[in-house]
Image (cartoon, rainbow, N blue to C red):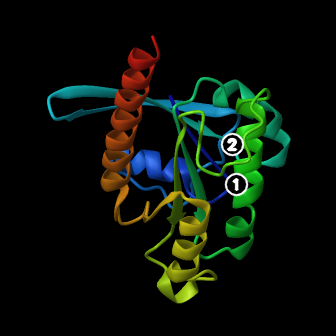
Amino acid sequence: RVVVIGDASVGKTSILNQLIDNNFHEHEQSTVGANYQLYVEEIDGIKIEIQIWDTAGQEKFRSLGPIYYRNSNGAIIMFDMTSRKSFEDLDEWIIHLYLRKNKSTNSNSNKSSNGTVIFIVGNKADLTENFQVSMNEVNEWAKQMDYKVMFTSAKTGKNVTQLFHNLSVELLKSRTHNYQKSKNDS
């Protein structure tokens, strides 16, 4: 299970439409609650099935987040490269994810000690002339926080497939690591 979270209108649903249908709608309707997609990829002969939960970014729907965060193995936390506010809100989304996903976890680590693979995604990377956040700034922030970062464009499809491939690889690594750890702990 992977959740896609972030402010409203950053392109969460559009990224999934591009991934699943190779389609982009200029005036996509805002998500109400959450939508679900299934993504399947084979890596080194291993079939990976990812349930992708596209969550609403509007404040009035945030209380529903914990329902989708629970039992998630990964998170795509998305912002809009043309909106500084959506970038600045990333910390709030990350805190919201951790607090709601693991109420009993007291970890102060930014890197997920609970096995959640996190990708920070700067969407609308095709609109370079309208950027309010530089790629360098995002890369530095993500490096300090120890998160993986990618830049995508739901409109052109840039890096959309690569994002989900990279996510699949990291989820497989995480699952293999967790399996080995539990095997060694027994």
Front residue (pair 135, 109): 109
Residue 20 shows in this picture = no
How far across and down, in percent of the image, does residue 99 sit?
78, 37
The answer to which quarter of the image holds residue 178 is top left
- Outermost residue on the top side: it is 186
How far across and down, in percent of the image, does residue 182 sit?
45, 18
Looking at the image, residue 86 sits to the left or right of residue 10; the answer is right
Residue type for callout 2: Ala
Secondary structure under tag 1 reads loop
Looking at the image, residue 37 sits to the left or right of residue 110; the answer is left
Q: Which residue is mark 2?
A: 56
Residue 135 shows in this picture = yes
The answer to which quarter of the image holds residue 162 is bottom left
Q: Is residue 37 above or below residue 9?
A: above
Looking at the image, residue 179 sits to the left or right of residue 138; the answer is left
Residue type for callout 1: Ala
The numbered mark at residue 46 is: none
Q: Which residue is mark 1?
A: 8
